[in-house]
Amino acid sequence: MNKTLVIGYGNTVRGDDGAGIAAVGILKKYYPHFDFLSIHQLTPELSETMSNYQSVYFIDASVEVAEVTKIKLQPEISTGILNTHVVSPQNLLNTCLHLYGKIPSETILFHIPAYHYGFSEELSVSTQERIEELVVYLSASVGTSNKKI
């Protein structure tokens, strides 16, 4: 099994919301030694898969960022009940730790700026350009701090 898993997620019929899945399609060409998942939404079952990897990279679209952003994730103590209808990468990391007793040594969430969420299977030009920036960034290296790239 490969040591790195890349999970791109989003809705491919809602314009830029499909950026994570589009990014995975491109990254597969450059990183044959990584494993990839393209999914519509995160589900609790992914925590078992994550427990088998050294590094996990999530890629998602976001209207809250103006440029590609990298966030290093760490488990947090949660006292609430897991809502299986809204699962975040952080929820998965916590579940991974609590159910399997281990987490990837590196878990990163990449946000790609999104501008248009209307019904469309096309990404905006701006979001396509940000995906290209992510590909270039990953080819240089993946560091460990929270920062804009």
Image: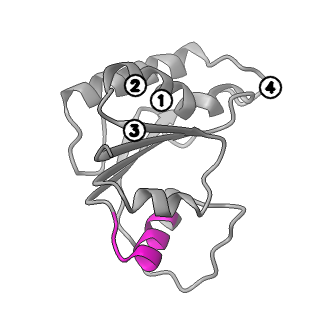
Looking at the image, is mark 2 or mark 4 earlier in the sequence? 2
In the image, what residue type sits under mark 1? Answer: Val
Residue annotated with mark 3: 35
Discs 2/3, front: 3
Q: How far apart are marks 4 and 3 (CA)?
A: 29 Å
Residue annotated with mark 2: 27
Looking at the image, is mark 4 or mark 1 earlier in the sequence? 1
Q: Distance between the residues labelled 2 and 1?
A: 5 Å
The residue stretch that appears in magenta = 92-103
Question: Mark 2 touching mark 1, by CB under 8 A?
Answer: yes
Residue at image coords 77%, 27%: 118
Q: Distance between the residues labelled 4 and 1?
A: 21 Å
- Residue 61 shows up from this direction: no
Which residue of the protein is positioned furthest toward the right in this rendering? 119
Question: Mark 2 touching mark 4, by CB under 8 A?
Answer: no
Look at the numbered disc 3 and give the secondary structure of its residue: strand
108 left or right of 122?
A: left
Residue at image coords 25%, 60%: 105
Residue annotated with mark 4: 119
Q: Distance between the residues labelled 2 and 4?
A: 25 Å
- Does residue 139 lie above or below 105 as drawn? above
Residue at image coords 24%, 51%: 145
Residue annotated with mark 1: 24
125 left or right of 56?
A: right
In the image, what residue type sits under mark 4? Answer: Phe
Q: Distance between the residues labelled 2 and 3?
A: 10 Å
In the image, what residue type sits under mark 2? Answer: Leu
Look at the numbered disc 2 and give the secondary structure of its residue: helix
In the image, what residue type sits under mark 3? Answer: Asp
Q: Residues within 10 Å of mark 3 (few under 14, many from 20)?
A: some
